[in-house]
Image (cartoon, rainbow, N blue to C red):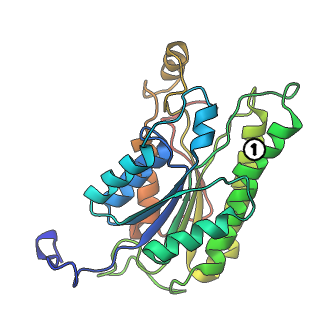
Amino acid sequence: MTIDEQPSDPATAPARPVALITGVGRSIGIGAGIARQLAASGWDIAFTYWTPYDRRMEWGAEDGAAASIARELEEAGARTAAIEADLTGPDAPIRIFDEAEQRLGPVTALVLSHAESVDSGLLDTTVEAFDRHFAVNTRASWLLIREYGLRFRGQPGSKPGEPGAGVGAGAGRIVALTSDHTVGNLPYGASKGALDRITLAAAHELAHLGVTANVVNPGPVDTGWMNDELRDAIAQGTPLGRLGTPQDTAHLVDFLCSPQGQWVNGQLLKSNGGAAS
């Protein structure tokens, strides 16, 4: 069926699958870029944000960001559910899934783009900061993946790449964003490394559900946290001579969530323009 042949009546149009994306708190962030791309590709979008985190970071909170992002996604044809959630709480993942399902329906794709990220090294990291990084980046990610696995109701053994199968058909998707940065950023890098292991385990332990799980390292993406000196240094150290963008990451996540991405599973993929670690 071509685009021109798609049903014009919303009542007869195929249902859009639901993607749950965490960490969509700012309009220039990677999470927002992924949400826009998936909405344009035919997904309905539930997303989480946590304003107090942005408020205590140097870039500050963006007033009205969640509502603005939701409007953009709706203009692209998506139903949306913006969910404010503090991921330091172990009960947050259950509440997030409950609200996403009540408002949009079962979740087909889970994209983890949230992060606690406060620079500190081996000697100056506090126990409180270390625990908060692992609570958000590692424990919350595990609990979100676990909740997804407990609730997923796709069709095991389905083949979403077969003719007639649309976006999100059949199998499920998990994509987690990671980082290999550790020097001067110990709790962030260490907690993201643990997230990698959890996500790659899901590629095997959830395979019977027809779910794929992959990790994406987007490399250095300027979402407002870089100064001019750092921007220039990173661009010069990247073979393609530029910084990454949220759109770069979004295109890869979009592919992994599509029927064409079904054979990519259990991988840690670098989407960083060839930047050296």
Query: Which residue corresponds to the image point at 71% horizontal and 46% vertical from the top-left?
Result: 192
**Quarter containing the C terminus:** top right
Please state if 162 lies on the left or on the right of 204 as rendered: left
- Crowd around label 1: few <14 · some 14–19 · many ≥20 (10 Å): many
**Looking at this rendering, what residue extends furthest in the left direction?**
4
Query: Which residue corresponds to the image point at 86% horizontal and 29% vertical from the top-left?
Result: 122
**Looking at this rendering, what residue extends furthest in the top direction?**
229
Q: Amino acid at mark 1?
A: His
Q: Position of residue 99 (x, y in %)?
A: 54, 70
Please state if 102 lies on the left or on the right of 43 as rendered: right
Please state if 186 lies on the left or on the right of 269 as rendered: right
- The reply to whether residue 21 is visible in this rendering is yes
Q: Position of residue 269 (x, y in %)?
A: 57, 50
Query: Which residue corresponds to the image point at 86% horizontal and 33% vertical from the top-left?
Result: 126
Q: How many marks?
A: 1
Please state if 270 lies on the left or on the right of 94 as rendered: left
* In-front residue for pair 174/204: 174
Q: Position of residue 41 (x, y in %)?
A: 32, 61
Q: Position of residue 29 (x, y in %)?
A: 47, 40
Query: Which residue corresponds to the image point at 72% horizontal and 62% vertical from the top-left?
Result: 142
Q: Secondary structure at mark 1?
A: helix
- The reply to whether residue 261 is visible in this rendering is no
* In-front residue for pair 251/187: 187
Q: Which residue is mark 1?
A: 133
* In-front residue for pair 174/32: 32
